Image (spheres, grey):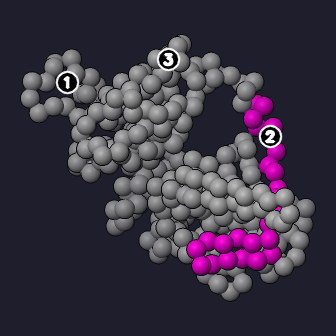
Amino acid sequence: MAHKFYEDTALPKLVADFGSLELSPVDGTLTDFMHTRGLQMRSLGSVVELADKLPHVQSLCIHEMIVRAFKHILQAVIATVDDIEEMAGSVVSCLNVLLGSLPGEAVDSDLANTVSLKHKWLEIFLLKRFGWKWKDEVSSDLRKFSVLRGLCHKWGAGAGAADMLPSELLSPLQVVGVLRLGKRTLKSTAASSTTDKLKASNFPASLLRIGSWECISRYEGDLVAKCYYAKHKLVWEVLEGGLKSKIEIQWSDITALKATCPENGPGTLDVVLARQPLFFRETNPQPRKHALWQATWILLVDKQVLHK
């Protein structure tokens, strides 16, 4: 019964909301939209088939599936590196195999076999993991920079690939940072359990300004900033009319921070983002229970509309 509801109602409703623009997915938000509705990422293949009239949604789903597939290969490569000095070179070699293109002439047979094996593995993985069969036309529409950005986001690798053509290869000098330090860090349960125990820090705020829009706190608790260390998120919660709204910012999306802390008077924090944050609205609040959040594409505060 639950499986039938999931396949016949929940997934089609998600696609219908994408089509009506009630939800507007972009790179990095698709996962949050699906998780908020209790949908598994294994259903991405089904979403692709249902969204036959929404090519932009299909493209996002396909790129997300490819990123998740390549993530397993990158994970295996990083786990085999014992010397941190060799980390950048190993990551670069892996990314070049995954995202590089064959030269137009004088192709080495071993390289051609490697590329063929990569495509075959990818087809099998997508079919078994997501129930989606690879289509040849996808190759011409594949945005390699989008896949690279997704891999860097999931594995903490920063790639300085500015002014590069999609067919060009990365060099070790263009990998500017790797946060996951080999298999010892990846397999360290002690370190991860310590991070999970970190609690969020709450900071009462008096003013939140985004462009020309602003929200002013009139009573204590109306406006609260929260820093989630384990989840790597910065969150603003706004209480208005008995219901909360919140803005979620991923740490990886922050490109610049400026904190001003005067001795006398309130401090300020300026945040510059690489992409738009996520907006949520509280639904069906219950006493002494955790808030339930519904993703939304606008945030209503004091009868003003803040668009993404």
- 305 displayed left or right of 171: right
Q: Where is residue 154 in the image (x, y as percent from the top left)?
A: 53, 40
Query: Mark 3 sits on what residue?
Result: 85
Quadrant in the rendering for residue 9: bottom right
Q: In which quarter of the image is the N terminus?
A: bottom right
User: In terms of secondary structure, where does tag 2 sit?
Assistant: loop
Q: Does the magenta stretch include residue 201?
A: yes
10 Å crowding of disc 1: few (<14), some (14-19), many (20+): few
Quadrant in the rendering for residue 292: bottom right
Front residue of 196/92: it is 92
Q: Quadrant of the C terminus?
A: bottom right
Name the residue at 82% across, 45% down. Answer: 199
Front residue of 207/1: it is 207
Name the residue at 79% across, 59% down. Answer: 262
Identify the amino acid type marked 1. Answer: Ala
Residue at the front extreme?
A: 263
Question: Is residue 90 positioned above or below 261 on the image?
Answer: above
Nearer-N-terminus badge (3/1): 3
Q: Position of residue 196 (x, y in %)?
A: 76, 37
Q: Alpha-carbon distance for marks 2 and 1?
A: 48 Å
Q: Which mark is residue 112?
A: 1
Q: Are marks 2 and 3 in contact (CB under 8 Å)?
A: no
Name the residue at 57% across, 47% down. Answer: 252
Q: What stretch is highlighted in magenta?
A: 193-217
Residue at the left extreme?
A: 105
Is residue 193 at all visible to an observer of this figure?
yes
Query: Mark 2 sits on what residue?
Result: 198
Q: Which mark is residue 243?
A: none
Is residue 71 at all visible to an observer of this figure?
no
